[in-house]
Image (cartoon, rainbow, N blue to C red):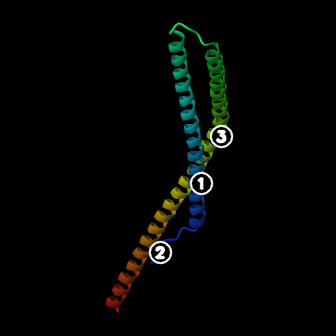
Amino acid sequence: MAKFRFRLETYLRLKMAARDQCRADLAEVLRAEDQLKQHQADIEREMEEHNTYVRSVSQKGTLNVDLIAASQSEFVFLKALRQEKLNLMQQLQPHIQQRRQALIDADHEVRTLERLKEQKHEQHQQWELALEAKQMDEIALGGFRRKGD
């Protein structure tokens, strides 16, 4: 019997490699997004700690104008840094969506080729069964003819 060979196997492997690359690209962008979120959370925490410190210093009674001015400029810097991280995350969103869509498309192509491969394999098995049945019929007919002679 002939062994099944999918003629588009190389193409399927190329599409699988492309899908894996899309998956890696998406993972890379998602890691970048997670890092930005972590940085933003760190900034938020630092801003809260800064506010707590300023409140505790101002409650002691004497106000240090230099400390308040320095703390105000640090707070403004932290707010600007937080806004920068937000802007970067917003700029990253279209890239994430684009890579997600590329992965969806690549996965669809691979699944389509895999279904085609399964269909062709089933057709091959049916063809082999039909061929085997035909050969059995010919053997049976050959035996029948010999008995009739």
Q: Position of residue 59 (x, y in %)?
A: 51, 9
Q: Which residue is mark 2?
A: 3
Q: Considering only order in the chain, which callout, 2 or 1, is on the residue closer to the N terminus?
A: 2
Relative to the observer, which residue lies in front, 90 or 39?
39
137 shown above or below 34: below
Check the image and name the residue furthest to the left.
147
Q: Could you tell me which secondary element the residue under label 1 belongs to?
A: helix
Tell me the CA gap for discs 3 and 2: 44 Å
Q: Which residue is mark 1?
A: 21
Q: Position of residue 72 (x, y in %)?
A: 64, 18
Q: Amino acid at mark 1?
A: Gln
Q: Amino acid at mark 2?
A: Lys
- Comparing labels 3 and 2, the label whose residue is closer to the camera: 3
Relative to the observer, which residue lies in front, 92 or 105?
92
Which numbered marker is on residue 59? none
Few, some or many residues within 10 Å of mark 3 (<14, 14–19, 20+): some
- Identify the residue shown where x is 60% and y is 49%: 25
Which corner quadrant holds the C terminus? bottom left
Tell me the CA gap for discs 1 and 2: 31 Å
Q: Which residue is mark 3?
A: 95
- Asked whether disc 1 touches disc 2, contact meaning CB atoms under 8 Å apart, the reply is no
- Comparing labels 1 and 2, the label whose residue is closer to the camera: 1
- Identify the residue shown where x is 52% and y is 61%: 117
Which corner quadrant holds the N terminus? bottom left
